[in-house]
Amino acid sequence: MPNPVPLIEMRRAGFRQQETDILLDIDWRVEAGEHWAILGPNGSGKTSLMRVACGYRWHTSGVVKRLGEELADLVEMRKRLGWVSGEVLAYAPPEESAVSFVVSGRFGQMGLRAMSDRTVTEADFSDARKLLEAMGVGLLAEKPLRVLSQGERQQVLVARARMTEPVMLVLDEPCAGMDPAARERFLMWLGGLMAEPSTPAVMMITHHVEEVLPQFERALLIGEGRIVAVGATGEVVTAASLEKTYGVGVAQLVEHGGRHWPIWGERR
């Protein structure tokens, strides 16, 4: 049953740090089940926007409602979402099996070796294996993290994030460092995942326009901490909005397979 209130509602929200406005006058609303692409160049405020929206940072101006409320305890919001970032893998034990690492997500730990004070049950492992199977990556279950490809590790991270049945998944530049073939395999898998009705809202942070799959029906473009464009992807991902967001000309914006491929450079 869909959540009757918005997951996120921001009104003239801002985030100021060290006398610098990182975010300013943000108006944004995310409904349950929506899939969003957050686009912008490096340093534009993409990750800061999601950290404020999801309760990892306090806003310093305006109003931010999460799950329909101005929460006083941000920990409760963080428990309701799954943040998927390559930074997580830096703390993951390389010899840990994929299924064990997925199980550890239920307890907010980096692998089961850090859980001497907790009891892990067979039911936890069963749930993790079922989740990996349902996501089409069951064959990875017993493999150690160290032997997985970068794309496979991202898939395991998504499975780990889903162990808490989140209302939202945040993918923070999930394709960073992948070669073109690995990236396309991962994106094909992600598109299939988002097509499943059981998949929660997905937010993907990226600075690569071509990574925005057709399943991302909505997009937010941000530059220098301010929203440049927000709305239906087909309406806001245009040559004009990309030029304004990235500060460089777009000679041509090619659409193929429901995705947009910018050719950067001045128009002739």
Image: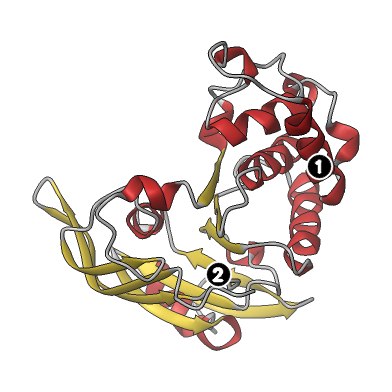
As drawn, 35 above or below 255: above
Residue neighbourhood size for the residue with mark 1, other residues' Cα within 10 Å, grouped as few (<14), some (14–19), many (≥20): many
- Which is more toward the observer, 133 or 94? 133
- Which is more toward the observer, 202 or 47? 202
Residue 93 occupies quadrant? top right
Q: Position of residue 242 (x, y in %)?
A: 47, 75
Count the labels in the image. Answer: 2
Q: Residue at x 61, y 80 (%)?
A: 252
As drawn, 69 above or below 171: below
Q: Label 1's element?
A: helix
Quadrant that contains the N terminus: bottom right
Q: Residue at x 55, y 72 (%)?
A: 32
Residue neighbourhood size for the residue with mark 2, other residues' Cα within 10 Å, grouped as few (<14), some (14–19), many (≥20): many
Residue 247 seen in this snapshot: no
The color scheme shown is secondary structure
Q: Which residue is mark 2?
A: 36
Which of marks 2 and 1 precedes in the sequence?
Answer: 2
Q: Which residue is mark 1?
A: 132
Q: Residue at x 54, y 80 (%)?
A: 237
Name the side, left or right, on which 93 lies relative to 122: left
Q: Position of residue 16 (x, y in %)?
A: 16, 55
Q: Position of residue 95 (x, y in %)?
A: 72, 13
- The Cα atoms of the two marked residues, 1 and 2, are separated by 23 Å
As drawn, 181 above or below 99: below
Amino acid marked by disc 1? Leu
Residue 208 seen in this snapshot: yes
Taking the view exactly as shown, the residue that stands out farthest to the left is: 19
Q: Label 2's element?
A: strand
